[in-house]
Image (cartoon, rainbow, N blue to C red):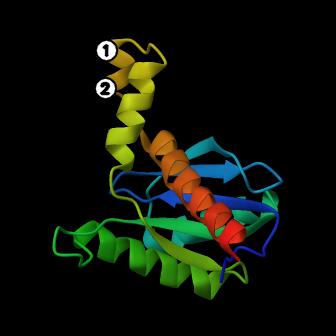
């Protein structure tokens, strides 16, 4: 799995019903950046494209955002994320981990507001920014674990 001793680019996916946001870290694995948005086709087709993007970007790990209910169990979208992760694991040798995506869309919306985006742009899809938030929270957690080891 992806751990504090890995170095290299890490990619994150914010899975959605219509689109998947993709983010990638810098080569040091410290800073998350938005990469692209994929239109949802089917779980298997999406996983194949995500795997290819990871390969092209030399990602050493793929993080999939997973939504949870208030009781801590995966909700419908969280279960879909888990199924996407399973298909992706079958298609690639790159480690795939699930990561709590709680608050990612709200944080992406706040980031757009802070960047001074117009109302029209704030209403648009936030998929790549949500993926960036998911990835940065994962990277920050890895960094904390590195310092405590």
**Residue at mark 2:** 123
Name the residue nearer the viewer: 91 or 7: 7
Q: Which mark is residue 119?
A: 1
Q: Quadrant of residue 147?
A: bottom right
Q: Secondary structure at mark 2?
A: helix
Left or right: 128, with 53 as reference point: left
Residue 119 location in percent, x, y?
A: 31, 14
Left or right: 132, with 61 as reference point: left
Q: Which quarter shows the C terminus? A: bottom right
Residue 19 location in percent, x, y?
A: 42, 50
- Residue drawn where x is 75% and y is 57% of the image: 29
Categorize mark 1 by other alpha carbons within 10 Å: few (<14), some (14-19), many (20+). Answer: few
Categorize mark 2 by other alpha carbons within 10 Å: few (<14), some (14-19), many (20+). Answer: few
Q: Is residue 59 above or below residue 111?
A: below
Evaluate whether residue 125 shows in this view: no
Left or right: 75, with 10 as reference point: left
């Amino acid at each position: 799995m992806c751990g504090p001793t890995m170095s290299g680019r890490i990619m994150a996916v914010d899975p959605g019903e219509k689109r998947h946001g993709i983010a990638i870290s810098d080569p040091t694995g410290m800073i998350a950046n938005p990469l692209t948005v994929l239109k949802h086709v089917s779980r298997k087709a999406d996983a194949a494209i995500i795997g290819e993007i990871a390969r092209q970007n030399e990602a050493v790990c793929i993080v999939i955002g997973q939504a949870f209910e208030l009781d801590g169990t995966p909700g419908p979208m969280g279960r879909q994320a888990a199924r996407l992760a399973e298909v992706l694991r079958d298609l690639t040798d790159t480690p795939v981990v699930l990561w709590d995506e709680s608050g990612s869309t709200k944080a992406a919306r706040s980031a757009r507001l802070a960047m001074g985006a117009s109302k029209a742009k704030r209403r648009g899809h936030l998929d790549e920014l949500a993926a960036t938030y998911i990835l940065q929270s994962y990277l920050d957690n890895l960094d904390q674990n590195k310092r405590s080891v």
